[in-house]
């Protein structure tokens, strides 16, 4: 590339080298060092004056260091008189924090976007953002590439009977992603609707809304507030005013706790929240009370067969299957589609904790008649525990992901089910076209 410099951060040097090979250029030298107090310093080993600088740095398992390293590299390039700085981030770090999940939380994905632009980034290239609204966090151009054509090409070349497969989304949030892949392959799709009553304790908070609706008129409440402490009034909102309050104050504390934990999110957001988006403490608590992903006590429904063009599938008679609901695992799983006797392609944009994938895979195999499950994700944020869980799950044949996120060779060797698709040709072509001022629209439709 004339007047271009390609640099690699330390997060994913293997992917950066593959991109350089596809571009038929060498990675430009850069030195990243740490002071004794772990501060990062960056020094380019070649002039970048009046050059178009491209920096490759993906999210990783030491994300904080690599984000800081990236912004320092961007600022170093700008202060060295680079003409333009383009950042290639295959996996956008902190992408799961693209909205406030708590009243006093932060939108960290927006913070990362601000850090990149303030440090001097002029253009961003990324792959399959976890949430589409992240592209609006930037004040500079952003190209969000899709791995769908590359994944579809792998399916066509490696699954002989893929025409008899069904693309399935494990929650309703992935409907658009699933329908796009189904249309590309020309096959049917299905959706899973999950009612996780334990996920955010949404049902346990229901009495709070009832209590609020039962509040007396404003004038009466003001009189009570002036005459008695607030906690006393809270204790008698739902009961008889003349009834004695427990001396230990347990009812008061319970009601105060319910009102403080009132979940004001839309009900559809609560019911369809992805397991992978849950807070770590809630996931740990859920795992402690649900030691196994088995669904023998799960109530579910198989509603209707739907094809990718919205018409009923062939031989798609409606059926409803029910299982006894267990009080310790109050969950409803609704399958919209037909997977009986077919191979399931379970698709999502990323996977880190595989619990929800394995649960859905078991449900589709044991209860819905699927003959096998392949998991497809754009970003595989694996560790040794997650890969071990997948390896030990008899309901998953393969898990296929791109190499957008670095996985060590030692970790990959522990799993016979893990398959990585090389995404470097797509990223290299995007860099080449941006450098030459060419359109990249065709990259969204066909594989490279």
Image (cartoon, rainbow, N blue to C red):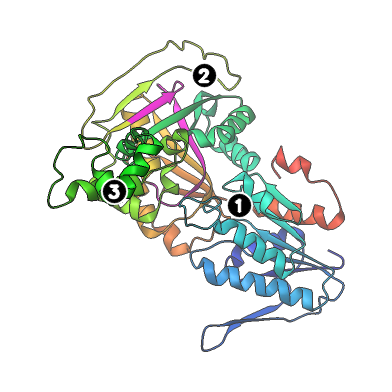
Query: On the picture, is 258 further left or further right than 21?
Result: left
Query: On the picture, is 8 further left or further right than 196?
Result: right
Q: Which mark is residue 336?
A: none
On screen, residue 311 above or below 420: above
Q: Element type at marker 1?
A: loop
In this view, the residue in front, 173 or 3, is: 173
Residue 218 image point, x, y percent:
40, 38
Q: Residue at x 17, y 51 (%)?
A: 249
**Residue at the spot of label 2:** 306
Query: On the picture, is 339 further left or further right than 379?
Result: left
Disc tally is 3
Mark 2 vs mark 1: which is more N-terminal?
Answer: 2
**Residue at the spot of label 3:** 227
Look at the image and tell me whether residue 419 can be seen: yes
Query: On the picture, is 1 further left or further right than 242?
Result: right
Mark 1 vs mark 3: which is more N-terminal?
Answer: 3
Q: Residue at x 24, y 28 (%)?
A: 325
On screen, residue 437 above or below 337: below
Mark 2 vs mark 3: which is more N-terminal?
Answer: 3
Q: CA distance from mark 1 to mark 3?
A: 71 Å
Whether residue 334 appears in magenta in the rendering, the answer is yes
Mark 1: few, some, or many residues within 10 Å (few <14, many ≥20)? some
């Amino acid at each position: 590339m004339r007047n271009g410099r390609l640099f690699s951060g330390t997060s994913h040097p293997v992917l950066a080298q593959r991109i350089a090979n596809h571009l038929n250029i060498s990675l430009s030298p850069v030195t990243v060092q740490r002071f004794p107090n772990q501060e990062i310093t960056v020094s380019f080993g070649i002039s970048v004056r009046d050059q178009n600088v491209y920096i490759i740095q993906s999210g990783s398992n030491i994300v904080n260091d690599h984000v800081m390293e990236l912004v320092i590299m961007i600022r170093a390039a700008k202060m060295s008189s680079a003409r333009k700085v383009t950042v290639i981030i295959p996996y956008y770090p902190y992408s799961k924090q693209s909205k406030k999940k708590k009243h006093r939380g932060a939108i960290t994905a927006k913070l990362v976007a601000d850090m990149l632009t303030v440090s001097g980034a002029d253009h961003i290239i990324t792959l399959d953002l976890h949430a589409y609204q992240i592209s609006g966090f930037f004040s500079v151009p952003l190209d969000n590439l899709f791995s769908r054509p590359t994944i579809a090409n792998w399916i066509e070349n490696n699954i002989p009977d893929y025409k008899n497969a069904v693309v399935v989304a494990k929650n309703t949030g992935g409907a658009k992603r699933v329908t796009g892949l189904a249309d590309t392959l020309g096959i049917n799709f299905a959706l899973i609707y999950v009612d996780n009553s334990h996920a955010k304790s949404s049902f346990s908070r229901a009495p709070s809304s009832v209590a609020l609706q039962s509040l007396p008129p404003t004038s009466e409440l003001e009189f009570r507030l002036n005459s008695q402490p607030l906690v006393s009034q809270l204790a008698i909102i739902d009961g008889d005013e003349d009834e004695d309050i427990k001396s230990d104050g347990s009812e008061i504390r319970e009601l105060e706790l319910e009102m403080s934990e009132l979940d004001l999110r839309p009900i559809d957001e609560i019911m369809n929240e992805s397991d992978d988006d849950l807070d770590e403490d809630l996931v740990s608590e859920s795992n402690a009370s649900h030691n196994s992903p088995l669904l023998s006590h799960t109530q579910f429904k198989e509603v209707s067969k739907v094809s990718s063009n919205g018409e009923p599938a062939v031989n798609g008679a409606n059926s409803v299957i029910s299982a006894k609901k267990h009080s310790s695992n109050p969950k409803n799983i609704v399958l919209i589609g037909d997977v009986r006797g077919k191979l399931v392609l379970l698709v999502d944009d990323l996977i880190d904790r595989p619990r929800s994938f394995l649960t859905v895979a078991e449900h589709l195999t044991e209860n819905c008649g699927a003959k096998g499950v392949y998991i497809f994700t754009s970003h595989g944020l694996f560790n040794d525990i997650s890969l071990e869980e997948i390896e030990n799950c008899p309901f998953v044949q393969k898990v296929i992901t791109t190499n957008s996120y670095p996985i060590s060779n030692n970790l990959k060797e522990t799993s016979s089910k893990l398959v990585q698709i090389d995404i470097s040709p797509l990223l290299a072509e995007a860099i080449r076209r941006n450098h030459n001022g060419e359109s990249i629209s065709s990259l969204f439709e066909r594989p490279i």
